[in-house]
Each structure stands twice: as C-alpha cells, then as structure tokens.
Image (spheres, coloured by chain):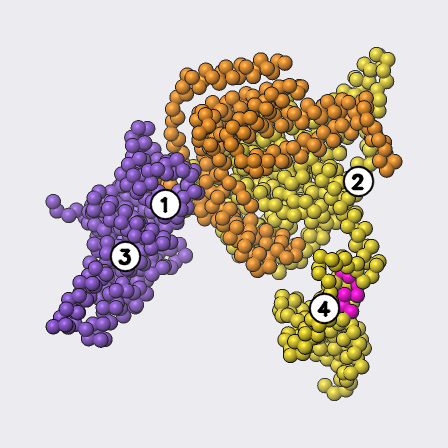
Amino acid sequence: MTGNRKEAIILLGHGSRIPGAGEGMEQVARRMRERFPVEIIEICYMSRIGPHFPEVFESCVSQGATKVVVMPYFLHSGLHMLEDIPELLLEKARKYPDVEIILGKNLGFDECLVDLVIKRLNESRDLRDVREMKPQVGKSRESGEKASTKKILSAAFIFLSAWLLPDQAHAMHISEGILPLNWAALWFALAIPFVAYGLHSLNKRSREDLSFKPLVGLMAAVVFIISCMPIPVPIAGTCSHPCGTAISGILVGPAISVVITAVALLIQAIFLAHGGLSTLGADIVSMGIMGSFVGYFTFKALRAARMNMAVAGFMAGLLADWATYLTTSVELASGIKGEAAFLPLFWKIVIAFIPTQLPLGILEGAITAGMVILLYKKRPDLLVKMRVIRPGDVKIPKQGLTALLFLLLIMGATMAAPVQAAKWSGVDEAVIEKVAKEHGRETKEPLINMEQGDLPLFLFLIAGTVGGFAAGYYWKTLLVQRKGRVTEEKK
Amino acid sequence: MADMTRLLLKDLGYIYPDGTEAISGINMSVAKAEFTGILGYNGSGKTTLLKIMDGLLKDFQGTVFLDGVDIRSLAPREIYRKMGIVFQNPNDQLFAPTVFEDVAFGPLNMGFSEKEVVQRVTDALRSVEMEDYAKKSIHHLSFGQRKRVCIAGLLSMGHEILLLDEPTAGLDPFGEYQMMDLLTGLNKEKDVTIVMATHSVDLVPVFLDRLYILNKGRVVRGGTPEAVFTAPEEMNQVKLRMPHIAELIYRLKHEDKIPFKKIPLTIGEARREMVEVLKKSNE
Amino acid sequence: MTFTDYINNKDHWLSRVDGRVKLLVTLIVLIMVLSYKGLTFQFLVTILCLFQCWRMKIPLRVFLLRFSEPVFIVLVILLLKIFFSGGESFFSTEVMGIKIAASKEGLAEGLSIASRIIAAISIMSLMVFSTPYTELLGALSWLRVPRGFIEILMYAYRYIFVLIEDAGVIYDAQKNRLGYTTMNRRFSSLGILVGSLILKAFEQSQNISIAMVQRGYDGHMPLLRQKPLTTSELLISFLFVTMMGLLWQI
C-alpha cells in the first residue's frame, strides 16, 4: 500500500466525572506533540467526560491516518485492558478495514516509576495529617456545585418516596392488621375458590406424576427465596423484592401457581412477618391470582403472536408485577379509607408506589425473561414437559387469541374497578352531603381532594410514559442481546 | 443353616434412554448377611446397578431374583418391604422437616399402628445413634448425621437388605470410620445384608466379605478382597488402585525383593507380615 | 440474606401448650382485633403479647426485625390519614405555598388503624415465637386445611434451606466473575440465578420422589394422628377467649 502513510497516536485514559481529572494525561500528550515525530497525537477517555474514543478515532481517520496506535494510559492490566478496550478497538476495526489499528502496551512497570514515586514521596513530606485536611473542592467550582445540587435533589426524591411509600422495602405484601375484618374476609372469600381449584388441579396432575407435588413444593421454596432477594432498585435507591409470580405462572400454569404463591406467602407471614395471616387472602388475590394469571396469559398471548421467549417472559413479568401493584393499591385503599372517598386515596397510593413499582416491574420482567431463556437453553425438554412450549409448533393456537382477549379483559377490569368503586363512594358522599345539609352544616371540602383529582392522573400519565420508555429501552436491549442466542424452537 | 442367596443377578444389562450402555452382562450373587462391595470408578455404572437391584429402573435386560423370585413379577410394595437404597446425597432422600417425621414415613406407609411406628422409629434411631435428635430439624444436622438418618429411615421399615451408594463419600476420616463401624454392626449383629457401592479401596478389605469390580459397566473381577487385589497394574487398568498398604508391600516384595509371604490388605495384616519379615532378617 | 429458624424457648409454659390450641386462640383474638373499632382492646392485647415475648426472652434483634416494617407502615398511614383527610383541623401550617392541615378525624382513624396493626402483629408474633413450624402445620391440618396444601408447606420449608445454600453458591460464583458490576449484567445474572434454582428444583424433586417411592409413597402423605387435647388446655383456652371477648366489649 504505497501512498501517504500517516500514523496517529491516541492516548486512552479512564475518564472521570470531574473535569480536569485527566489533566496529567493531556499534558503528556502536549509534550509528546513537541517531542515525538508523529503528526497526530490525540487523547480520549473510556467513560464519563469526553472526548470519547469513537469520535477521536474518526477524527484521526478524517485527518488521513492510515495507522492508529492506541496507548492505554493505565498502570495496571485489568478488565479494561483485557476486555473493554479490545472490544472498543475491534468495533472500529470492522468499520475501517483499511486502517491499521494497534493496541499498545499499558504503562505497567518501569524503573522510572520508582524514581517518580520517590519524587512524589519527597513532595509529600510537608503534608498534614489526613484528619486536618479539608475536603477537596473539585478543580472546577461549577462541577462541584452541579454535584451538590444533584445530591440535594436525589436526597429529596429519596426522602419523599420513603415518606410516601406505604411499603418501602417489602414490595407488595400487605402487613398484618391493615385490613379490617370485613375486607380481610372478603378477599379470603375471593381467594379460597382459586386455591381450592389449584389444589384440585395439583392433585390431578400428581396422580399421573408422583414427582409433581415435591416439584410444586420446591418451586414454592424458590418463589419464597426470590421474594426475599433484596434488589437495589435503580431509580428510587431503595431495596425491593420481586414477586416471582410470573415465573411460577408460566411454569406450572396459573391455577397451581396460586397454590405456590399461597404457600410462599404463608411461610413469609410466619417467619418474616412479610404480609400477615389475616391479609393472606388479599395477598393471594393480588399476587397469586392477579400476578399468576396476568403473567401466564401475557406469556401465552405473546408466544402465540410469535414473540420470542425473552420478550414474552419480560412482558409477563412486567405486567404481572404491575397488575399486582394495582390490585394491592385497590385493596389498601378500600381497607384503610374509613369514611373518606376511595378514588383519591387510591390514586395517592398508586402514585406513592410508582417510584419502586415502575423499576421493579422492569426488574421482574428482566428476571423472568432471564429465567425463561436459561431454561430454554439448558433444558428445553423440561419446558416441553411442563407444556410451556411445544416442540416445533409454529401455528398460532386458538388459545393464543383467547389468551389475548382474557388479558385485555383482566386489565380492563383492573382499570374499571377503581372507577366503579368511586361510583360507590360517590353514593356515600352524596348521602352524607344531603344529611349534612339537612342538619345545617355544609360539608367541608376534603383538603387537597378535588384539586388533586387532576394532578395525580397527570402525574400517573407521565410516570406511565416514562415507564413505557424504560420498558422500551430494556425491550430493545433484550431483543438485540438475545437475538443471537435464542433461535425459534424449530428442531 | 445353609446360606440363602438373597439377591441373584443374571446377565443384567441396562441401556440409558439416549442409547449409551450403562451396564451389561452382570452376574452377581449376594448371600444372606453378606457384606458385599461394588467397586468402580465414577461413572462405571454402580449407581445404575443399585437402582436396578432395588427395582427403581424398569427396562433392564436380564433378570434380578430377590429371594428366588423375579422382581419383575413382584409388586413394588413387596420389594420395598425388604430392600432399600441409601442415596449418596442425603438431601435427595430426607424430605420431612424433622428427623422423627422422616424416619416415620416408611413405617407409616407400610400401615403400622401409631404405637408400632413410634417404637420402630425409636429403635431405628438408636441403631444409628441418633435417638437424641428425634425432634431436630434436618437442616440443622451435619452431613454425616443426615446420612445416618437416611439409614434409620430404611431400618425403621425393617429392611433386611440395604443397598448403599457411596455411604462414605463426603465424610471426614472419623466419619468414614463411624459409618463403616455402624454398617458392620448392622451386618454382624442384626444380620442385615449389605451391598455397598464405593470407590474407597482402603476401607473395603477391612470390612467387606466379597467384592465385585465394575469397569465400563462390566464385572471384571469378583471374589474376596484377597482374590481381587492382586496387582497394582491390574487395578490401575480399571481406574482403581490397591489399598495403599497393599501396594507398598507389593512393591517391596516384587521390586525390592523383600520376602513377604502374602500381600496384606489391611494395616493389621501388614504389621504382622512386617514383624515376621523383620524378625527373620535379624536371624 | 439470613433466614433462620425460629427460636422456641422450651422453658416457657407457652411453648408447651399444644400448637392447635395456640393457633385457634390466636385466630379468635385476631378476629377480635380486626373487628374492634377503638383503642383499648388493641392496647391490652399488645401489652399482653409484648409482656409474654419479654418473658420468653426473645432476643431484641429478632423482635425489632419483625416489628420494624409494621411500625414504619403505621407511621406512614398515620401521616397519610392525618394530613389527607377532611374534617375539623387541630393544627395547620404552610409548606411551599400549600396549606396543610391535620384533621382530628384523620388522627382518630389513623390511630385506630395503627393500633389494630400493632395488636395484630403482636398476637401473631407471640404465636410464631412459641410454636415450631411442624406443630403449626399439624394445627393447620387439624383445622381441616387440605392435606395437599400441608404437604406442599412441608416440602417448601424443608428445601428453602437447601436452595438458599445453592443460591448463595451461585451468587458468589457470579460475583467473583464480575456478574454484578453493571445494571445489565446484574439483571442477566439474576435471571440466570433464578433459572438455576428452578433447574435444581426440578432435579431435586425427581430425586426426592424416587427416594419416597421406594419408601412406599403412593401420592398420599401419611400424617401422624395427634394426641387428643387435654381438658385442661381446652378449658383454659375457653376461659381466656371468653375473657378477651368481654374485654372486647369495652
């Protein structure tokens, strides 16, 4: 390859949030430009404040470089050296086949380092004890200010969510005693037929396969463990627990999943006081019934629509979690409202849950997807055995369409329920107002009630949109990442 | 009283569902109150063999006779009244929350009265020296203790034949000794017939009456320990080794030409041999 | 993550009471607590239970862990009720231009719910602290909870500890290989962890059922019949419940 051969050197540093942190490397680059016989010498960083490698590389190429030597400005050969940097370079290598790209050696050890350390040691002799040191304000006052306002805002956010959240660290369980007797009994009445049916279904299946009951027991243990895993929730900064209902719903079907959830809930109530005995019915309804059914039908519907396993699993987990969250909000609002109106309280609770529930739903979706993928890769025979997938079945079963309809129905019902409930409390209010007027007392407007009628709705919409985008982002990640590995089940 | 053959295997073979051959052409016989060992490297087919003997694997070739009756013609209940396997991993076998409940499971299934069940459980626990642990939760027990509870679970059913899959695996030296002591006690004092799969060659000659060596699913040697452990090279060929002490004496005899009379298999025997040889050389 | 078996102090008389009696009495008192609309009964129940817990020498840490979540919820509900209900206010202030008032009715309602929660948790805790799990299962089956359900409860309890250990091993292995450094990796590793646990559940259930079959299992879990309740136990519990009922009237 004759013609102009131009070499470029790029010093690649780690990168930091604080501007000016890479000052040392930049100075080295400047001195090298004076001393070293190469025309193009640039600097860039791996992360945080730029410039970053891709654009610097492109700039070198546009300056005519035919050979680029990338010098990692690292003392040690760690993960960046072994994995991240080569990956970064290879990406560009693919795009520019005519440019020679060399990854230079990192700084490592050299005799001159010894001289350097000794020199710095001598310079450090006059420094004071660390206890007398004042905290360093960043090189740039701007960044320092930015950092502190950011800190204040996030602190406020966390404080606010902590203050508002009825159930900070323990997700969707309703604590013992929250529900008064009538409501507790109602939810039990609703839950028991489902559990009974699940047990019946379990007995039937275990007659054919003696290992089924132990399997269900073990899965209950897994669900229990899952719901004890403290996951730091990204946005809110608190810890929360996944439910695991979508997972069990997909694997054993919704009916038996209700039983699994009931068992896990009971054990949690006994040993960890997550949820209670009196609120078992309510928790079974929200997690066991709503969670499992929504999770199961979402999965089936999406599979019938030929979505890949990861997406189906993700949406199942996500929607199951959100369905549970909405149901729990209904249960809580109706339980503690006392004389007040249902709907405003419901919305308050829904909003209070958003900071943890939105990301938690995504988390649950991701875990469900991950689990489904692992099983699909390692033991697809088990998935076939559990009738989760069919070997090589391509045609869309009618069941899929009914599943989709069912799903829409459930979601519609969940949305409609609070509206209906509002109608009932509307009756209360109308009656009370009438009676009050008769007695010559005007009813006082409940504070913040009507105003906030619109506000929470608006906030919820925004939260929903944000959540939607977040879901979309992760969806894409899952799709892109997983596409290479998951092939449709055509054997 | 003539020795009754309790288990007789004729031309036993088994092929895994994926087509690989696990074992083939096995001929074995186990007499009453005999302590038999099945030696083989990991993957030689020992576990499969035990499972077939216990009636847990069905589509095998050849025949298994339990007390003279083809087990294919026996109902599971009849097999499980007499014989049972102790698996390698106690977690695979102990499913109840407490020791008592687990050991009581077998007799309860057999239909004994409450009183009988309690009596059997107590006796079984006493045989394995775990009677103080009756009310304890299983997850509080050590590995060795769990193994003993597994054995108790079978003893409480009144089993006369015990099949054990690597009972000493995972135990520390003291635990190993305890376990073998326990099994020997059951064998000698209670006439329990024991078939033990293992690859622990040092223990075998101390305790066992007979042993069979499995290699690639076939029996390559069978007989008393003395008959089987003859040369290190042969043992290496089947991916096993001789007991250390035997190998030492073997090398001393064949390579250093020290005049040992026979190859001892246990430390006790070796001591006697060496004392004799040393005494002779002093003369 | 620590999940330890509950401690029972064998010396205390409550531990020696039959589990069935304890469960039944607990349920009755719980129903009373949940249907009471006031503060006195709840207060009495709470004091009684806390006293017994203290007598049983329950370690403070265990106690606080159990109560921490409900107490937090109580605070939040109180705040919610006080500041967001209508009615007569007894205290008001302005924060960032919004007028916030504390309502009397809200306070009353809030306290009613709060005391209900605390009382309910107290009685439940007392029962749990003084009864081993297997006794609770026996009590549940005595109350005619279906056997299949009890069987699942038994397996679940037994294998939680086994699976926690397995989960711990997998988690450490993943952590050692930088499986939790970025958010994406964390999600992926967790998914793998959960999937692996489920695979273990499958395997374990296969092995266990083989072992159970060879001990005669035919699908029905045999349960030992429990000793009949002594008349003294029944009498005392009856008296206790009646006394609580009378107090409830207050």
Nearer to us of marks 2 and 3 is 3
In the figure, what tint was chain A given?
yellow
- Image position of B234 with respect to A320: above or below: below
Label drawn at residue A124:
4
Spatial distance from mark 1 to mark 3, Cα to Cα? 20 Å
The Cα atoms of the two marked residues, 2 and 3, are separated by 74 Å
Task: Give the Cα separation between the discs numbered 2 and 1.
Answer: 60 Å
- Check disc 3 and report the residue beneath it: B203
Horizontally, is B35 left or right of A155 in the view? left
Instruction: Pinpoint residue C67: horizontal percent, then vertical percent.
Output: 61, 33
Determine whether the residue tagged by mark 1 lies in a helix, strand or loop. Answer: helix
> Where is residue B65 shown, x and y percent of the image?
23, 47
Tell me the orange chain: C
Q: Chain of mark 2?
A: A
Name the residue rendered at 48%, 30% in the picture: C131
Q: Tag 4's secondary structure?
A: helix
| Residue A70, position as x, y percentages in the image | 71, 75
User: Which circle's residue, 1 or 3, is located before the other in the chain?
Assistant: 1
Please state which of residues C247 and A258 is positioned toward the viewer in this rendering: C247
